[in-house]
Image (spheres, coloured by chain):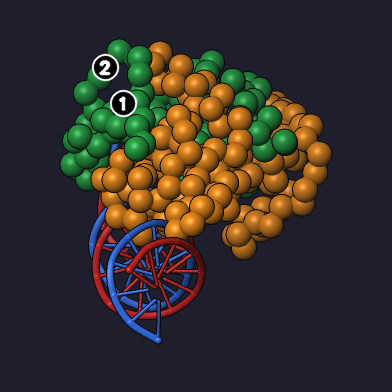
Chain colours: A green, B orange, C red, D blue
Amino acid sequence: MWYNKYMEFNTDNKMKTDKHQYITTKCQLPDINILYELSDFFKIMGDSTRLQLLWALEESELCVGELAELLNMTKSAVSHQLKVLKTAKLVRSRKDGKNVYYSLNDHHVKLILEKALEHICE
Amino acid sequence: MWYNKYMEFNTDNKMKTDKHQYITTKCQLPDINILYELSDFFKIMGDSTRLQLLWALEESELCVGELAELLNMTKSAVSHQLKVLKTAKLVRSRKDGKNVYYSLNDHHVKLILEKALEHICE
DNA sequence: CATACAGTTGAACAATTGTTCATATGTGGT
DNA sequence: ACCACATATGAACAATTGTTCAACTGTATG
């Protein structure tokens, strides 16, 4: 007989299909909603363009054009991805004349990247 | 004038399109190949089904049927995802009669999940 | 006001993804 | 040998994703 403290996982897994709007609960034992938030977070990190943007911004704030030149991409593509990162609250923006400067918004991201790097590098 | 120590980012970004086979380098400064590996890792974590599997296996090893019942999924779907996790070396398997038992293969994963949880929970 | 530049946006497209279904493989029991 | 069960596999499908392109907003400058 097997038993597992996370047995209550999918008491309500219809939520997944309709773009799961989470019930915001305080953080304790990982329930299914937390896992949805977690996977959404990892989904955002799971793109090399976005990781490049985050790495670049870890150094200093940069505007869209600079980032586009740095990563050798169109401004449009960069802008699209910055929007994703901003919606996820991973970056913030500051307008200065014609330019919009982006910078990191969350100190956790760096820590997570470091842990993941340890994993990759064995 | 802007400058950034990661300026050499995309000296060779054709590698991205053809499913980037990485040049395995020892871990030091994050170069573009490391970022590809990182994003591949996050991609795998970026699915709630796979996260559920990992969480469940953190407790104890389980076989495919048990996991399927636990997550309320078909055995086929579970098997497919376990294969993804195994290919990524995040789980390992052990055959016992008709059953195949899966367990976590990497201690880093738990640490990363914890860091990410801290981030989610603010 | 006109122009040039910086950034945003939405539609379109190809590419990738996760699940389902049907089928195959392998194991133990009778 | 046969059957029942556990798992794996591949094709098919819908859904999601990232980039490109063209058009748009906004700002500075002449």
Mark 1 and mark 2 on one chain:
yes
Instruction: From the top left corner, tell me how far across and down residue B64 is, in percent.
Output: 40, 50
Give the amino acid type for the residue marked by disc 2 in the picture. Answer: Thr
Report helix, strand or loop for mark 2.
loop
Instruction: From the top left corner, tell me how far across and down residue B23 is, in percent.
Output: 77, 51
Pick the front one: A6 or B29: A6
Residue in view at x 47 percent, y 33 percent: B60
Q: Nearer the viewer, mark 1 or mark 2?
A: 1
Report whether A23 appears left or right of B34. left
Residue in view at x 25 percent, y 19 percent: A24
N-terminal-most mark, 1 or 2: 2
Q: Which residue is mark 2?
A: A25
Q: Which residue is mark 1?
A: A31
Residue in view at x 29 percent, y 45 percent: B69
Residue lying farthest right? Answer: B26
Looking at the rendered image, the quarter that the N terminus of chain B falls into is top right
Vertical comparison of A47 with A88: above or below: below
Is residue A46 something one can see in this rendering?
no
Q: Where on the picture, by quarter, is residue B51?
A: top left
Q: Where on the picture, by quarter, is residue A44?
A: top left
Vertical comparison of B19 with A52: above or below: below
| Chain letter of disc 2 in the image | A
| Chain letter of disc 1 in the image | A
Report helix, strand or loop for mark 1.
loop
Residues at marks 1 and 2 touching, judged by CB atoms closer than 8 Å: yes
Instruction: From the top left corner, tell me how far across and down residue A103 is, in percent.
Output: 53, 22
Report whether B36 appears left or right of A25. right
Residue in view at x 52 percent, y 21 percent: B115
Instruction: From the top left corner, tell me how far across and down residue A55 is, in percent.
Output: 62, 30
Is residue B22 something one can see in this rendering?
yes
